[in-house]
Image (cartoon, helix red, strand yellow):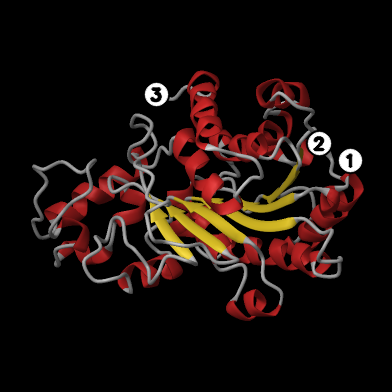
C-alpha cells in the first residue's frame, strides 16, 4: 500500500481489515464474488487535506478501484468511524464488486467536532470528492464504476455538500445515502422545509420522489406510484434522533416534528415547553448512540440494506434476498 499503516488511526485500521471476505460473500450469494476494496487515509498520512486526497486517489488506482462496478466516496464521523452495518451491506448487495474510499478529518466525536471544528467535514469531503471525481470523469462512461456518496452523522453533513449542483449537471454521479444528518446540515434542512404539504417533518416527501426520498425504521422508499430518476438520493433518519432534530429554536418555538402526527419512536408524553425541551434534547445528543439499535443515533443494518437497495438497484436482487441478508446481519452485526 502507498498508505502507511500507522498513519490511519484506530478507526481507519478497523475499517480496512473488517468486512466480509470473498468467500463469505460467495457463500451467501451462491455464486463467485470478489474481495471488496477499502481505502482509508488518516490525518497523519499526509500534511494537508489536498495531499491526503491525492494519496487516496493514488491508492484507488493502485488497487484497481476504478475497475469495479460500484465506487463510494464515504465521509466518516468526527472520530473517523464508518458504520460496518452500512459498508458491509453494500458489499453484500454487489457481491464484493465494490470500492469504498474514506478520509479522516478529526479525532473527536461528531458532536464535539461540531463545536470546535465545524468546517472540517465539509472541507475534507469536498477535497476528496473533487480528486476522485476529476479522475472518474476522464474514464469511458460505459466502463467506469457507478459513483455514489455516503456519510453518517457529521459525515452526512460533509458529504451532502461535496458535489455541487453544477457538478451534478455536468457529469452526474448516480446518487447518495446519507444517514443521521446533523441539525446544522443546511441541505437537509432546506429539503425538509420545502417538503410536500401534509408530509411530516420527521419523514418528509419531496416533490415526486424521483430524485430524493426520506426513510426511517419502516421502509418508505418504495411507495406505489413513485418512480426513480437516473440519480437517487436517500436520507435515513429516525424521529428520535436528537442529533438530527435538535435546534436552537427549540428554546422558544415548538418544532415541526412535535406538531400533528409524530414519529413512532417519539414518546407520546413528550410536550414542548420553552427552554425545557431545548435542554432535554441538547442533553440527549451525547447519549444518542447508547440507545438500542433502530432508535436515536444508532442506525440499524436492516435499514441500511433497504436504503442501499433503493439507491444502487443491485442487479438480480429481490425481496427474498433482502430478507435473507437482514437475517444474516442480525446475527453478524448484533447491536445493544
Mark found first going from the N terminus, 3 or 1 = 1
SS at badge 2 = helix
Q: Quadrant of residue 321?
A: top right
Residue 117 in view here: no
Q: Are marks 2 and 3 in contact (CB under 8 Å)?
A: no
Residue position marked by numbered label 3 in the rendering? 336
Q: Quadrant of residue 149?
A: bottom right
Mark found first going from the N terminus, 2 or 3 = 2
Q: How many discs mark residues in the rendered view?
A: 3
| Residue 222 % position (x, y) | 42, 51
Residue position marked by numbered label 2 in the rendering? 5
Q: Is residue 202 left or right of residue 206?
A: left
Identified at 59% across, 45% down, the residue is: 107
The answer to whether 148 is drawn above or below residue 218 in the figure is below
The answer to whether 64 is drawn above or below residue 156 in the figure is above
Measure how far apart labels 1 and 2 are at the Cα level.
8 Å
Q: Are marks 1 and 2 in contact (CB under 8 Å)?
A: yes
Name the image quarter holding the C terminus: top left
SS at badge 3 = loop
Q: Is residue 262 left or right of residue 57?
A: left
Measure how far apart labels 3 and 1 are at the Cα level.
35 Å
Q: Is residue 123 left or right of residue 254?
A: right
Q: Is residue 312 left or right of residue 203?
A: right
| Residue 59 % position (x, y) | 86, 49
Amino acid at each position: 500500500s502507498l498508505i502507511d499503516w500507522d498513519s490511519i488511526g484506530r478507526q481507519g485500521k478497523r475499517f480496512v481489515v473488517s468486512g466480509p471476505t470473498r468467500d463469505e460473500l460467495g457463500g451467501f450469494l451462491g455464486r463467485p464474488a470478489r474481495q471488496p476494496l477499502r481505502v482509508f487515509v488518516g490525518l497523519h498520512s499526509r500534511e494537508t487535506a489536498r495531499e491526503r486526497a491525492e494519496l487516496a486517489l493514488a491508492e484507488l488506482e493502485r488497487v484497481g478501484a476504478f475497475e469495479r462496478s460500484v465506487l463510494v466516496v464515504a465521509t466518516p464521523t468526527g472520530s473517523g468511524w464508518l458504520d460496518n452495518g452500512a459498508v458491509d451491506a453494500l458489499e453484500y448487495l454487489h457481491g464484493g464488486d465494490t470500492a469504498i474510499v474514506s478520509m479522516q478529518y478529526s479525532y473527536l466525536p461528531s458532536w464535539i467536532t461540531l463545536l470546535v471544528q465545524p468546517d472540517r467535514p465539509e472541507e475534507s469531503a469536498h477535497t476528496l470528492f473533487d480528486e476522485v471525481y476529476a479522475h472518474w470523469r476522464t474514464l469511458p462512461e460505459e466502463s467506469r464504476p457507478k459513483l455514489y456518496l455516503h456519510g453518517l452523522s457529521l459525515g452526512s453533513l460533509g458529504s451532502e455538500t461535496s458535489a455541487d449542483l453544477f457538478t451534478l449537471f455536468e457529469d452526474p454521479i448516480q446518487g447518495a445515502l446519507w444517514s443521521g444528518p446533523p441539525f446544522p446540515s443546511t441541505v437537509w434542512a432546506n429539503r425538509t422545509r420545502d417538503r410536500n404539504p401534509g408530509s411530516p417533518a420527521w419523514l418528509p416527501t419531496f416533490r415526486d420522489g424521483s430524485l430524493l426520498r426520506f426513510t426511517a425504521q419502516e421502509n418508505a422508499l418504495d411507495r406505489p406510484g413513485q418512480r426513480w430518476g437516473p440519480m437517487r438520493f436517500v436520507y435515513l433518519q429516525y424521529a428520535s434522533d436528537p442529533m438530527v432534530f435538535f435546534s436552537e429554536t427549540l428554546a422558544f418555538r415548538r418544532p415541526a416534528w412535535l406538531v400533528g402526527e409524530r414519529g413512532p419512536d417519539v414518546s407520546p408524553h413528550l410536550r414542548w415547553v420553552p427552554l425545557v425541551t431545548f435542554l432535554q434534547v441538547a442533553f440527549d445528543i451525547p447519549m444518542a448512540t447508547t440507545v438500542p439499535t433502530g432508535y436515536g443515533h444508532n442506525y440499524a443494518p436492516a435499514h441500511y440494506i433497504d436504503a442501499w437497495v433503493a439507491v444502487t438497484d443491485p442487479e438480480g436482487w429481490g425481496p427474498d434476498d433482502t430478507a435473507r441478508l437482514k437475517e444474516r446481519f442480525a446475527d453478524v452485526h448484533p447491536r445493544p
